[in-house]
Amino acid sequence: MNKFIEYTGERSEYVEPERKYADELHEIRLYCGHKECNQYIKGIEGYNGLFSAETGQQADLRNQEWRCEIHS
């Protein structure tokens, strides 16, 4: 399995794209599920919470979260 490419950036400075239509695809940052961690991965969020990371892994953001290597 491919490893995620982890980036660091302030959570408070990131503004998620606004969804206007159900079928839109948005490039997003998915931050670590640990409350104060600023590690994130990049990917595409599609319809109904489907997330595809830039390395190919997929997740359903309705019931899954991502944890960085430090907090996993």
Image (cartoon, rainbow, N blue to C red):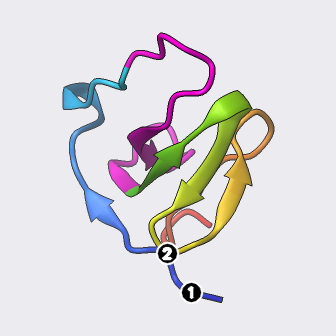
Which quarter of the picture shows residue 17? top left
Is 21 rendered above or below residue 64? above
Q: Which residue is mark 1?
A: 2
Q: Is residue 10 left or right of residue 55?
A: left
Tell me if label 1 and label 2 are in contact, CB under 8 Å.
Answer: yes
Q: Which residues are magenta?
A: 18-40
Q: Element under label 1?
A: loop
Residue found at x 52% / y 62%: 53
Judge whether residue 24 is colored magenta: yes
Q: Provide residue 28's location: percent of width, then percent of height.
A: 40, 41
**How far apart are the two marked residues, 1 and 2, measured between alpha carbons?**
6 Å
The numbered disc on residue 60 is none
In this view, the residue farthest toward the right is 63
Give the quarter of the figure containing the N terminus.
Answer: bottom right
Q: Provide residue 13's location: percent of width, then percent of height.
A: 19, 29
Residue found at x 63% / y 69%: 57
Give the quarter of the figure containing the C terminus.
Answer: bottom right
Q: Is residue 37 left or right of residue 11?
A: right
Quick one: label 1 or label 2, which is nearer the N terminus?
A: 1
Residue found at x 48% / y 70%: 70
Q: Element under label 2?
A: loop
